[in-house]
Amino acid sequence: QVMLVESGGGLVQAGGSLRLSCTASGRTFSSANMAWFRQAPGKEREFVAVIKRTGGSTAYADSVKGRFTISRDNAKNTVYLQMNSLKSEDTAVYYCAGYVGTYEIKVVPSQVDYWGQGTQVTVSS
């Protein structure tokens, strides 16, 4: 069993930055593709970004492309999401996710094997 624990959420003004971290327990982290999702109140959980198990490939939702950067450190079992130029519409609970299937440039929730508990990001305008 893999446990994912997110941190780094909080309240930030529009235009500001936050960095989310997600640390995994267990020895399977380096074999999992890792992703970030988010869910705003009353909306479905949506894909934000994904990074290949090796860290060599990344992909982003159009809504965050150019503002967010996903990265990982397999030695630390940690994946990051650097969020810059934040907008009010980025307000959501952000979830870390891992899956062991084939890397794809867009992930749907049904593909995910492991979920974190979520961390709240609130952007004030």
Image (tube, rainbow, N blue to C red):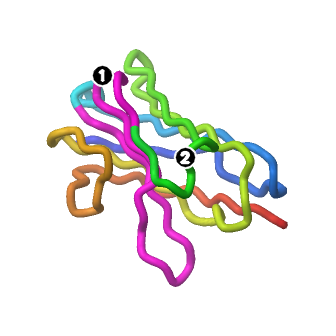
Q: Which mark is residue 78?
A: none
The residue labelled by disc 2 is 65
Q: Residue at x 49, y 61 (%)?
A: 38
Left or right of 35 on screen, residue 53: left
Residue 42 place in picture, x, y as percent: 52, 84
Image: 52 above or below 59: above
Q: Secondary structure at mark 1?
A: loop
Q: Quadrant of the C terminus?
A: bottom right
Label 2: how many Cα within 10 Å (few below 14, some 14–19, many 20+): few
In terms of depth relative to the viewer, which is nearer, 58 or 19? 58
Q: Quadrant of the N terminus?
A: top left
Type of amino acid under label 2: Lys
Q: Quadrant of residue 47?
A: bottom left
Q: Quadrant of residue 122?
A: bottom right
Q: Earlier in the sequence, mark 1 or mark 2?
A: 1
Q: Residue at x 38, y 20 (%)?
A: 74
**Residue 106 colored magenta?**
no
Residue 70 place in picture, x, y as percent: 50, 36
Q: Secondary structure at mark 2?
A: loop
Which stretch did the figure color magenta?
Answer: 32-58
Measured in 3D between alpha carbons, the distance from the residue under mark 1 to the one under mark 2, in whole angstroms, is: 21 Å
Dot in front, 1 or 2: 2
Type of amino acid under label 1: Thr
In terms of depth relative to the viewer, which is nearer, 78 or 86? 86
The residue labelled by disc 1 is 54
Residue 21 place in picture, x, y as percent: 55, 38
